[in-house]
Amino acid sequence: MSTGKDRLRTAFLGDGNLPPWRQPPVWAATSALAAGAAGGVLALSGEPGGAGAFAVVGLVATLGLAALMGRRWDGPVAGLLLEAAEESPAARMLADGEGRLIYANPAFHRLFAMAVSLDDMAAILDGEDATEAFRRLRGSAAAGIPDRAEVPLKLATSGTREWRRISVAPLKGHRHMVLWQAEDMTPEHELDQVRRREEDRLTDFLDHLPAGFFSVDAQGRIVFANQTMADWLGLPVEDILARRPPFAEFVVSTAGRPEAGTGGDGDVVLRAADGDTFRASLVQSAATDGRGRLAFTRSLMLRDLAWRQEEDERRQAALRRLHGLFDEAPVGILLLDMQGTITDCNRAYLKLIGLHRDAVVGRSFAERLNKEDRADALAQLSKVVMGTSRAATLDVRMPGARERQLVASLYANRLEDELGEVDGLVLHFIDTTERKDLEVQFAQAQKMQAVGQLAGGIAHDFNNLLTAMIGFCDLLLERHGEGDPSFADIMQIKQNANRATNLVRQMLAFSRKQTLKPVVLHVNDALSELANLLRRLIGENIDLKMESARDLHSVRADPNQFDQVIVNLAVNARDAMPRGGTLAIRSANVTLDQPVERGAESMPAGDYVLIEVADTGTGIAKENLGRIFEPFFSTKGPGKGTGLGLSTVWGIVHQSEGFIFVDSAPGEGTVFSLYLPRYEPGDDELPAPAGVEDMRAKPPAADLTGAGTVLLVEDETAVRMFGSRALRNKGYQVLEAASGEEALEVVNRAGRPIDLIVSDVVMPGMDGHTLIKLLRQEFPDVKVILMSGYAEDALNEEIQNDPTIHFIGKPFTLKDLASAAKRVMGS
């Protein structure tokens, strides 16, 4: 059976058994598919005017000319056009007049969940309206009429509602060939929903304000009125908008110039539909058309005010009330002039940023934005000022109250005078910090959980492989000394296995599953001891400055891990300054009275020791700032780092109950800020956490030989082979078993006491600890060494609290295993 792509290839290349004048209409299929490919390319490059249509016209003309000259596209050219259609990001599909699918490119299949027919497409439509619209498209396609529609889909893969814009275009001269095109409209619909909700909120706010808003046209007819104004006039809003009564119909008397069409201000007495009269003050502004004639007025009415004699007093009172509406609005509002200077702001905005009005008004708006967001925000606002865009909506970040990093949705509109000239901007701010923080925290929590699971799996499975590799290298080195030609090769294998071991440890550090040995650490002393090492690491072209505060608090941390954090940050700073610069390491005491939220982090109030590592290097691009602590993410070139340096730093700092933040911008250097909680002397009285001591941490015994019967239980064959050979070489009698169940059978067959059990913790079926408990019923004095590739904190509390159980973590060397057996047997 031929596929759609095979049929299309025949349409391109023709049938070799037919003469040229009987070949299929290649220009129709070719132009349609090539138009899709070219249209996708032009659309991606930002060309206006409909790239798909432009490509169709151009290629149809070209191919038509070729047909008139009696030429036919040869195989390579047609094949290239077919590949262009296949690789195009624009969704295109060819069907005949009956609706049968001739060809659809991969982009089309992706948009419609691999649908292979029009019926498949209809099956994933969401709702009767979508079904009816699609039925209309099919009818238009069959009738040879161009048509388009937007329809929702319910995709099983995502479980959400998605939107597609579908259009049909019959090919000229081939009414039975129809080009179907589609594009994803889901983001636009989601944005429309957000805008609609905001518009509903603003409409509700406008309708229920304690002031009347209305507008009249050049003929004095009311063309808009809010609910408050309609209530005062005693008419439904719908009736006013439908009938458009003249404003003068309700006017009893005026003072000033409040008559319709003048755009003036003043006091007025109005008569409602039920005959009651009331007094009100009217403030109006007029809008003109392109010829300077009145188009409509914008009117604000405040009723039940004291009657004032002087026009200026009435206007000032009305303006004060109008400003009250501005000042008490539930969203932050800023007014900017044409130079971007803040001319006014309301209370909600001041509350958001935590500043006094005097510190805001008269300053540049750009100063209130984060450096990374300034360029994008000012570019969007410039478009609004120039008239390219009527309004702009964007998310910005700026310093907020109480050292809070504020994220706000900014809505910008132009301010125009009575002549329609732009004289400033009005910016509305809605605080979305909490929602953004929750989104980032949720994503980060999911990422951390996934990486933690990955690290645990690697620590177990990969450490088993490394144990075997390192162990067999040790066995080979016993037979091949330094003078042997194979010695260098074996050492290379062992060294690379050790490097792999360090990678696993770095991943465990990121997932915060490594074992730390915290002590009371004096940060200034630790930094002073590192100074000489850091100077050698960063080179002579970089100036190292150490700035330490006096009377610095102590912290509780693992000294080795602390050194690793500072060294990793210093090496990163060195790489960011290839032509030299300055590396500054500063320390200071910091007290936070309120919690600080930055991105996904929430740092509680308290006393901290702040350590800053600042460089004058190239800086970090905005799009990379949120990913620099991810494992294996690196901005360096291939072969220049594993991408685990900063992720290791992140894991060590957080496992030490600290926090790390980064501030950077391209060309302005980078500052890493480490916050470690202050050590309180009372913490010495807390009991140390229980744990099994790793035998690898102890120095090896001088004599590694021994005697006795050892039961070795390990499900990994290579590890078991290495372990048994290593122990036999040291004089032990070894019984081997691949599982807990097999170990019980081996002990029963042996018929002799067991002196030492060396068992893996995690095995299929019976685990190592269960095996130990069963064997101790028969051999209560048997000594035990448990092995595991997991981090030590993965061992259960019962193992950790048993002082008769010893532990050796994988990967281990031959010397580690022999030394552990020697020490345990002699204890």
Image (spheres, helix red, strand yellow):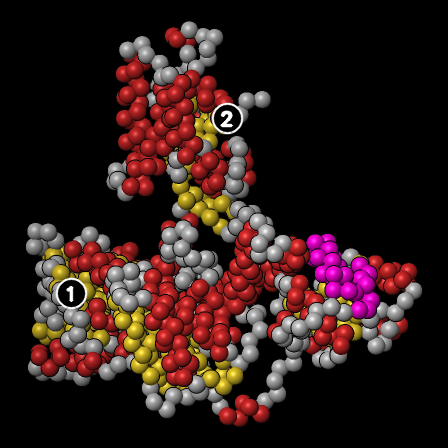
The quadrant of the image that shows the N terminus is top right
Q: Residue beneath label 2, please?
A: 4
Residue 609 occupies quadrant? bottom left
Give 460 or 826, whichever is nearer the viewer. 826
State left or right for residue 548 relative to residue 114: left
Three-letter amino acid code at the position of disc 2: Gly
Looking at the image, is 780 positioned above or below residue 446?
below
Give 82 or 716, whichever is nearer the viewer. 716
State left or right for residue 49 relative to residue 712: left
Picture coordinates of residue 525, whole percent (x, y): 41, 84
User: What range of the chain is rendered magenta?
Assistant: 707-736
Q: Which residue lies at the image location 66% right of the left edge and 66% below the top edge?
A: 815
Picture coordinates of residue 52, whole percent (x, y): 32, 33
Looking at the image, is 722 positioned above or below residue 612?
above
Q: Nearer the viewer, mark 2 or mark 1?
A: 2
Do the CB atoms of the residues marked 2 and 1 lie less than 8 Å apart?
A: no
Disc 2: CA contacts within 10 A as few (<14), some (14-19) or many (>=20): some
| Residue farthest top in this picture | 19
Disc 1 on helix, strand or loop?
Answer: strand
Disc 1: CA contacts within 10 A as few (<14), some (14-19) or many (>=20): many
Which is more N-terminal, label 1 or label 2? Answer: 2
Picture coordinates of residue 619, whole percent (x, y): 30, 63
Q: Residue beneath label 1, please?
A: 424
Q: Which residue lies at the image location 55% right of the left edge and 53% below the top edge?
A: 488
